[in-house]
Image: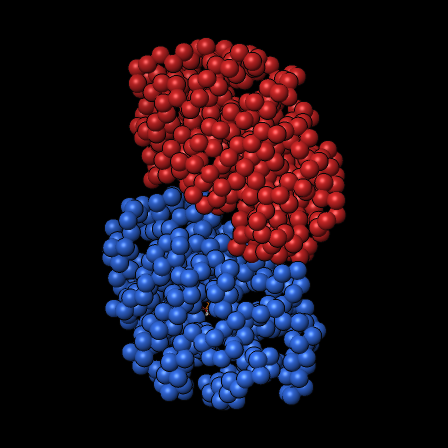
Chain colours: A blue, B red
Amino acid sequence: MKQVLIDTKSKTYKVFIDARLRFTIGTLLESIVTQPVSSVFVVTDSVVAPLYLDDVVGSFEQKLPIHTEVIPSGEASKSFSVYENVMTKALECGLDRKSVIVALGGGVVGDLAGFVAATYMRGIRFVQVPTTLLAHDSSVGGKVAINHPLGKNMVGSFHQPEAVFYDTETLYSLPEKEWRSGFAEVIKHGFIRDQRLLSWLQKEVSSFNDIPVQIVNDLLEQSLAVKANIVAEDETESSVRAYLNFGHTLAHAIESELGYGEVTHGEAVAIGMIYALKLSEKTFKVDLEVEKYEQWFQLLGYKTQIPSHLQPVQLLKKMQSDKKAEAGTIRMVLLRELEEAILLEIPPNSIKELLDEQLEVE
Amino acid sequence: MKQVLIDTKSKTYKVFIDARLRFTIGTLLESIVTQPVSSVFVVTDSVVAPLYLDDVVGSFEQKLPIHTEVIPSGEASKSFSVYENVMTKALECGLDRKSVIVALGGGVVGDLAGFVAATYMRGIRFVQVPTTLLAHDSSVGGKVAINHPLGKNMVGSFHQPEAVFYDTETLYSLPEKEWRSGFAEVIKHGFIRDQRLLSWLQKEVSSFNDIPVQIVNDLLEQSLAVKANIVAEDETESSVRAYLNFGHTLAHAIESELGYGEVTHGEAVAIGMIYALKLSEKTFKVDLEVEKYEQWFQLLGYKTQIPSHLQPVQLLKKMQSDKKAEAGTIRMVLLRELEEAILLEIPPNSIKELLDEQLEVE
Ligand SMILES: NC(=O)c1ccc[n+]([C@@H]2O[C@H](COP(=O)([O-])OP(=O)(O)OC[C@H]3O[C@@H](n4cnc5c(N)ncnc54)[C@H](O)[C@@H]3O)[C@@H](O)[C@H]2O)c1
Ligand SMILES: NC(=O)c1ccc[n+]([C@@H]2O[C@H](COP(=O)([O-])OP(=O)(O)OC[C@H]3O[C@@H](n4cnc5c(N)ncnc54)[C@H](O)[C@@H]3O)[C@@H](O)[C@H]2O)c1
């Protein structure tokens, strides 16, 4: 069992990584808590429930009152109404301040159940049991949120889990596009902090079919180490944590313009990273070998161009209303070189110019 | 201008107390912030808005973009739907992470706007501008929340304000019953921590008509000092902060059984305090002079008996499902003597017995 330590100002906890961990969640939870647990509330989604819910519930061997709630699969569940429903269910089940929420699923379940945990009776404990590759990113760092029709993740908190239990076996039921979505964040961690990881990935991963579980365990460990590193330096996103937004400023705009769900998050991030690399090359007059990465991305099945029917003006507007923006300015993470991220305020003109170029190319 | 320092683990801030402070909120805010403010969002209610909103907005002298939102007056505004509406308005106004929310009103506005601030883009700054006596209690300590049909304040966070600006002049437009409601919390602070305050109050306050503003400033300062003291020792309610719940376990049950709004919070707390005093006398076999306090309470217009149509069994059930309860037990704050609060797990039997007695008396 691999372990990655997450050390933030408000809490220190571990990510446990191994195939088949889901059968021991009960015991693992018992081993990591320092305060007694009165009951457990497993939140999962309608796709994950039939696959893994019984295994997780079974792992508690009826030692504790255990309740479950299944939300619809998909981004639309990060809504006010599902949030309210899960709160209602939690109250009906009689969860108290010593109860623990188990978020079993991808980033959607993690973000929603985490926000419920953050705000149920002003905050109770929760653990993450990620079942997607992307959730390696979302399960660590304590960012929890729901969406607002006017913007993604606009309503949320910082609330660290007690632990993250990563059963890598569960990833093998993921459709290819979900591998692709999550893998973009792994690549991102390589770009901003770990050149060695990036080269290793280029060597080891050229398709998402049958990656050996050993490789998956390794890449998760390394990718999580980058995130751990950054989160440790800066829990609440004031400085280096912003580097995690590499590729995300444009990605959010694309997702929002297309309507959430039209592209996966990772697919949008891939486009955003290529754009950010190009803007970096222009801004710092350096060669980052964008073409090489574009080719690898394409090999892996990513699109690297902005969808041609999107309007540069609209994308720009969305980028200006990003959560990380202040009063209409655009701040983006660029790379001076590999591993050398920097957060810069970019003139809207420069953004627009490259958007226009990229959209003409198509 | 009086000042009370609130020193919590997560933040240190001041309560400023003086008549007519509302005309200088803009300047005061400028003086206390350490990070630039991009815009201001004043949240208030439909009763307070016509009285004081212009004064507060005017105090900013158009130095900053300023937006306002008026919610319906009353407890019903601490709901999911008003929460969502205010979030929508905040997004429409383009609030960013450097914006500051101003909560202008009583505890309802403070709790709701505070919860919006706690969760808007994962948390932005806010200040409290309390306009009720009760809000001296709610504006300090960082507890923010909305209600759920299944329980009051069930959804919320801990989020400390940047400062509290208390314009005592605004209290003079309060109806008498709101004075009565707020004053119960002042008395509570006397019981649990400040016997001198309690005696002084008994001497100075025998009606809510025309209390001189000097007395109001003084009593707020002293009452806030008690709260400050307790919050400093224990920000998140694990130990001594629980003492602030003196009188509240039964009060919450009464409010919830009657339906919120049927009695004011303070009226319910007054009944709860008399009950807790009686239970303390029984439990510790001491004489706390309950009759003396009952008489003073009645002079001030409080009811001291549990409304006779309520069912002991129902009240008991509600007390067992209180947020502070764990797995069905009841933990209540009792007094071993004045200023000597203690948090005790009470057998449901004893609770029920005294409830029966109290309800027979009527
Ligand atoms: N909190 C953070 O720091 C953070 C970081 C990045 C992304 N996110 C959020 O994460 C979300 C995206 O996460 P995601 O990509 O995991 O989405 P997701 O949770 O919707 O999962 C993707 C799809 O895979 C299904 N699924 C999950 N596990 C499966 C399994 N083992 N086998 C088969 N199908 C499975 C789900 O039902 C869903 O249909 C977004 O809402 C994003 O905002 C949060
Ligand atoms: N967060 C905490 O620590 C905490 C502590 C105690 C109570 N509370 C909460 O506080 C709320 C009760 O607070 P409240 O009693 O101030 O209620 P409130 O905000 O509803 O105010 C009471 C009434 O007075 C009106 N009003 C407010 N200021 C006025 C003024 N200056 N002149 C005339 N009318 C005015 C309001 O419109 C309302 O009708 C409850 O929701 C309770 O849960 C919170």
Q: Quarter of the picture for ligand 1? A: bottom left
Residue B357 vs residue A78, the one in the foreground: A78
- The residue shown at (37%, 39%) is B238
Image coordinates for residue B27, horizontal then vertical, percent: 67, 41
Which of these two is toward me, A281 or A123?
A: A281
In the image, residue A38 sits, relative to residue A111, either above or below, namely above
Residue B88 location, quadrant = bottom right
Q: Is residue A231 left or right of residue B139?
A: left
Quadrant of image for the N terminus of chain B: top right
Residue plotted at (69% across, 75% down):
A349
Q: Above or below — where is A50 with respect to B19?
A: below
Q: Is residue A163 left or right of residue B227?
A: left
Is residue B184 at least partly visible in the picture? yes
Q: Nearer the viewer, residue A131 or A346?
A: A346
The vertical placement of A272 against B305, above or below, is: below
Q: How many marks?
A: 0
**Residue A232 locus on image (x, y percent):** 40, 61
Where does the image place residue B236, in percent across and percent down from the top left? 41, 41
Residue at 66% x, 49% y is: B40
